[in-house]
């Protein structure tokens, strides 16, 4: 008789549950300052809270497939209607759905690294092969490398994914490079998780009208400040949305997040406040930490900032450990480009931002 292990799908065998160690730590030790996961430090607005309460009282009812909130999203983005919008339980679920509709075992997804780790996790579940094209580290800046991304395309390429702005580098790809990738006809996911911080004028949603292969993804986890609620969406041509929606789990987005999301979209003032607060904080931390000799501060259009302290003689992991000893959780980054000085700071409250500047400055200059 065969063992149960022999029946597992070969490419999923041994894949562990995804556990984000620093998020586990933050929930275990709530006294620590969470400056590691690109969350929003501000709690939901009172309008969102009212929707959570109102629809919490109707939690005995199944949700629909989000017709009202999808219509609102279409309106905000200048699209025809709900047929251009698919919603998910966070944008992580949205990639999962898209990947399922394009990727077969052995086929390839091109990503631009360093980048968000979930693309790889979801691609691997499907037996896909991730082709990672590194950004170029030059003149204290991480440059997108569209030439190498285009060169990496093979007849097995099923998806190209670019976060724009990118996590963790914080910058946008040039529009001419976005267009060059769109022109290939290969399904091209532009992950706009952080685009609201720079404004929707930076979005490439308009391309979905010309290029059926362009799919935009967004989330409420960042500028809208609803990471724990889990709500994300995809925008694309209606035929493409219809096809990728075929893989949706029925009732994947619950009644409460769906209506709370609608309240968040309607509360434009709350979004504007959060964006303004964030962008001021990015300026503050950038200016202050640029004063540390040898520290490379990457310009960010998002709610986090990437650093390379390799030249200071200290390691990124040491900065993170020191910050933790002072009560702040930061995000270490793997060694790359011959430097072990990488770390990332997520914007916190005003007090937290001041504190992180002091702690990092103290550690790197002593
Ligand atoms: C590039 C990128 N995309 C998407 C997400 C958000 O995922 P979700 O919508 O599942 O919270 C993140 C979160 O860190 C991210 O960095």
Image: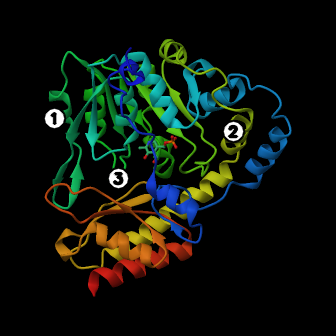
Please give the residue where the numbered disc 3 appears in the rendered image: 168
Q: Residue furthest front?
A: 1
Residue that numbered label 2 is attached to:
257
Name above or below for residue 276 compared with residue 260: below
Q: Earlier in the sequence, mark 3 or mark 1?
A: 1
| Percent of width and height locating residue 71 | 66, 26
Task: Answer above or below: position of 87 versus 346.
Answer: above
Task: Identify the image's colour scheme: rainbow, by chain, secondary structure or one colour.
Answer: rainbow
State the CA–CA distance, disc 2 to disc 1.
Answer: 39 Å
Q: Residue at x 22, y 57 (%)?
A: 335
Whether residue 56 can be seen here: yes
Binning the other alpha carbons within 10 Å of mark 3 as few (below 14), some (14 to 19) or many (20 upward) gives many
Residue at which label 1 appears: 148
Q: Is residue 176 left or right of residue 358?
A: left
**Place of residue 175 in the rendered image (x, y in percent of width and height, measured from the top left):** 31, 37
Decide: is 260 above or below 46: above
Cα distance in 3D space between marks 3 and 2:
27 Å
């Amino acid at each position: 008789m065969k063992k149960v292990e022999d029946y597992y799908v070969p490419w999923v065998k041994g894949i562990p549950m995804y556990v984000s160690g620093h998020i586990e730590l933050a929930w275990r030790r709530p006294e620590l300052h969470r400056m590691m996961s690109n969350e929003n430090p501000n709690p939901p607005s009172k309008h969102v809270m009212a929707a959570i309460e109102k629809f919490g009282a109707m939690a005995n009812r199944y949700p629909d497939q989000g017709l009202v909130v999808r219509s609102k999203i279409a309106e905000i983005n200048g699209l025809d209607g709900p047929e251009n919008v698919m919603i998910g339980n966070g944008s992580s679920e949205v990639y999962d759905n898209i990947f399922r509709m394009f990727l077969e075992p052995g086929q390839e997804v091109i990503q631009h690294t360093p980048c968000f780790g979930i693309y790889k996790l979801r691609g691997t579940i499907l037996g896909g092969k991730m082709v990672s094209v590194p950004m170029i580290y030059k003149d204290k800046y991480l440059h997108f490398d569209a030439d190498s991304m285009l060169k990496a395309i093979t007849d097995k390429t099923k998806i190209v994914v670019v976060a724009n702005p990118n996590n963790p580098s914080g910058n946008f790809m040039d529009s001419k490079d976005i267009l060059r990738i769109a022109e290939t006809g290969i399904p091209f996911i532009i992950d706009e998780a952080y685009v609201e911080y720079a404004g929707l004028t930076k979005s490439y949603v308009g391309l979905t009208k010309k290029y059926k292969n362009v799919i935009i993804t967004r989330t409420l986890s960042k500028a809208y400040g609803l990471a724990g609620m889990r709500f994300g969406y995809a925008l694309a041509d209606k035929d493409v949305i219809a096809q990728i929606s075929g893989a949706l789990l029925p009732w994947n987005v619950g009644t409460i997040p769906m209506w709370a999301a609608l309240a968040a979209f309607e509360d434009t003032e709350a979004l504007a406040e959060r964006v303004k607060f964030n962008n001021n904080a990015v300026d503050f931390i950038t200016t202050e930490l640029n004063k540390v000799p040898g520290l490379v501060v990457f310009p960010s259009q998002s709610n986090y900032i990437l650093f390379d302290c390799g030249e200071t003689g200290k390691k990124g992991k040491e900065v993170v450990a020191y910050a933790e000893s002072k009560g702040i959780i930061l995000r270490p980054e793997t060694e790359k480009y011959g430097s072990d000085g990488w770390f990332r700071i997520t914007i916190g409250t005003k007090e937290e931002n001041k504190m992180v500047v002091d702690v990092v400055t103290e550690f790197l200059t002593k």
